[in-house]
Image (spheres, rainbow, N blue to C red):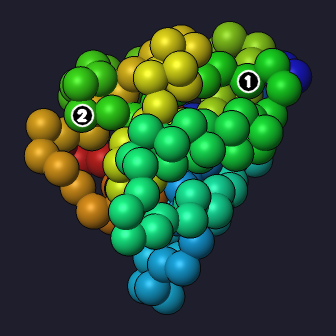
Amino acid sequence: GVFLFMAWGASRDSACYQAAASVKMHLLAVGTRMPGWVATAFEEYARRMPRECSIELREIPPAHRGKSGNPDRYKADEAQRILSALPKGSRLVVLDERGKLWTTRQLSQQLDDWMHSGHDVALVVGGPDGLDPSLMQQAQQKWSLSPLTLPHPLVRIVVAEQLYRAWSILNNHPYHRA
């Protein structure tokens, strides 16, 4: 939906007072038993997000891994679980090391585009074996946080913080000072 908002420190008469669309960000992450500090840090940034740009975490149970398992089968099983949890009509964005690297300013522009697209966004973090190729092919976008391999619990926090930072840039909020 469309609503009115005021940028940080803007007056009702300023050019910063504008109409903007809302978006709900769904972070679908494979993995369930995260340390408490992960949930605490994620929630800190999620609660800072305004109603028009909220972020919600949905944990996806990982595939059961045996001693002589098949990683391709695990990824296929997790892909089905992800697709089942995917909100209808949402834009599918997978996090992958081969995805597009964005600067913080580019992410803020991407967030603005998402907010005006009329669709919620599902950001997907795969399990320890990565994402199934079928899911990768369905993605409208692929985003790489870093060329480094990051621990999955840390990815949840980095995504939430960067989305908050991107929102703060769009709204001239003092959080981002670079």
The picture quadrant where one finds residue 81 is: top right
Q: Give the residue furthest to the bottom.
A: 36
Q: Position of residue 82 (x, y in %)?
A: 66, 41
Work out whether 28 lies above or below 15.
Answer: below
Which class describes the residues within 10 Å of circle 1: few (<14), some (14-19), or many (20+)? some
Q: Does residue 158 appear left or right of residue 101 in this picture?
A: right
SS at mark 2?
strand
Work out whether 127 lies above or below 77.
Answer: below
Look at discs 2 and 1 and give the one toward the viewer: 2
The residue located at (49%, 78%) in the rendering is: 34
Q: Position of residue 61 (x, y in %)?
A: 64, 62
SS at mark 1?
loop
In this figure, which residue is indicated by the disc labeled 2?
A: 97
In this figure, which residue is indicated by the disc labeled 1?
A: 90
The residue located at (76%, 14%) in the rendering is: 118
Going from N to C along the chain, the mark reached first, 2 or 1, is 1
